[in-house]
Image (tube, rainbow, N blue to C red):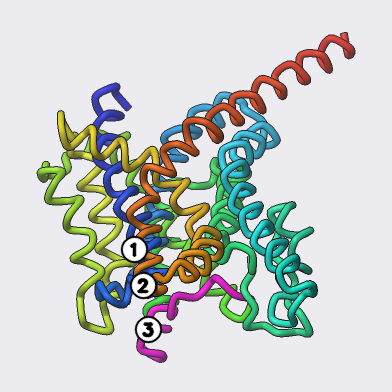
Amino acid sequence: MSHDSSKAIFGTLNGLRGIAALIIVAFHGSLGEALSLGNGYLAVDLFFVLSGLVIAHAYEKRLKSGISLGDFVRIRLIRLYPLYIFGILISILFLLLSYVSKGQIIEERLKLFRSIPFAILMLPSPPSNSDWSQGLYPLNPAAWSLFFELVINLVYAATFRYWTSVRLGFGLIVVASILFYNALTTGLIYGGGGANWSSLHFGLLRVCYSFPAGVLIYRIHQRGARIPIVPPLILITAFPFLLMLPSPWCAPFNVLVGFPLLVALASASEARRGIAAVSNTLGAASYAMYAIHSPLYLISVPTFSRLGLTPLLAEIVVVACIIPFSLIIDRVYDTPIRGRLNHWYTRTRLKMVGLRQ
């Protein structure tokens, strides 16, 4: 891709990513119901499409030039883990405070304590007593999508040479057919599945459609296809309206057609000046917002309730503060930590090479 093409892709898509993160934050609280964001869970599918495009853009040439699978996994873990563990540590702090205040571990939080070792390793927590309704990540429910993100990233890096455009198109048709069949038989495309063990297969279907769709959009750009130019502000504001479609077919339409089309149009529309600044700010805060919002709800809502705020008002405070808080966390914690981890890995690898020689 040319330099200008890269600007177009990331300038506008940053805004989409940020709006999607805010919608997820609102959806996971009672504020989502107040704002009629019943389909807000679909924002995850937009994330998967964006991920496919961005990963292919950032790594496909490097994979072709010989970057190892191990290096790729290391890069992705360094990108995702620091903010992920930050959120987990917030939840662990909540559990410890709860234990200290009550003097015992109450039954309903026992499974949260049991999930700590798995959460630290970024692994799904096994279901307690074969309770298949249990979430994959009890300490941070939203982290389920990060798990599928890593799985599809690993599959892509290991098999990218087989991801031809024709095979991508055929694969999308197959997965879309399965999703569409499920929509016909259940009335929903997957019912927001993927976050717990009983709907694990739905999570796999979601990422196996949306991520490859993003890779295919990248290929379309590579070939210089002409994509209509739509003002970025229209595209960014269109996303919430897509989620408000009242029909039960809102989910199938958005996942199979709406989101890939939106991302394709946004990738060809360069944001400028004020819109670019806002988009980049939202994009910079988006991952932190997603990674820590559930633990923030967990610890802040009870705290604010003790101050006399209703749960809804407490959640509004969290949503109002989460962008500046996420930007601060990104600047003072995530970026420095990732820099140090990369520096440490580079030094360690050079020492190993020196010892071999």
Q: Relative to the observer, which residue lies in front, 334 or 45?
A: 334
Judged by depth in the image, the label closer to the viewer, 1 or 3, is 1
- Judge from the rendering whether residue 298 lies leftward or rightward of residue 316; answer left or right: right
Of the 4 image quadrants, the one containing the C terminus is top right
**Amino acid type, residue under disc 3 in the picture:** Leu
Residue 238: x and y in percent read 17, 58
**Amino acid type, residue under disc 1 in the picture:** Ile
Q: Is residue 293 above or below residue 315?
A: above
Q: Which residues are magenta?
A: 182-196
- Judge from the rendering whether residue 71 lies leftward or rightward of residue 309; answer left or right: right
Residue 188: which disc? 3
The structure residue drawn at horizontal position 62% and vertical position 44%, both measured from the top left corner, is: 81
Q: Neighbour class for label 2 at 10 Å: few (<14), some, many (≥20)?
A: some
**Amino acid type, residue under disc 2 in the picture:** Leu
Task: Assign the magenta stretch its main secondary structure.
Answer: loop
Q: Is residue 241 magenta?
A: no
Instruction: Determine which residue is flagged by label 2.
Output: 312
Residue located farthest toward the bottom when viewing the structure as drawn: 185
Question: Label 1, label 2: how many angstroms apart (C-alpha)?
Answer: 6 Å
Residue 161: which disc? none
Q: Relative to the observer, which residue lies in front, 334 or 357?
A: 334
Q: Is residue 256 above or below residue 180?
A: above
- Judge from the rendering whether residue 51 lies leftward or rightward of residue 84; answer left or right: left
The structure residue drawn at horizontal position 25% and vertical position 48%, both measured from the top left corner, is: 264
Instruction: Determine which residue is flagged by label 1.
Output: 316
Question: Label 1, label 3: how many angstroms apart (C-alpha)?
Answer: 29 Å
Q: Neighbour class for label 1 at 10 Å: few (<14), some, many (≥20)?
A: some
Q: Secondary structure at mark 3?
A: loop
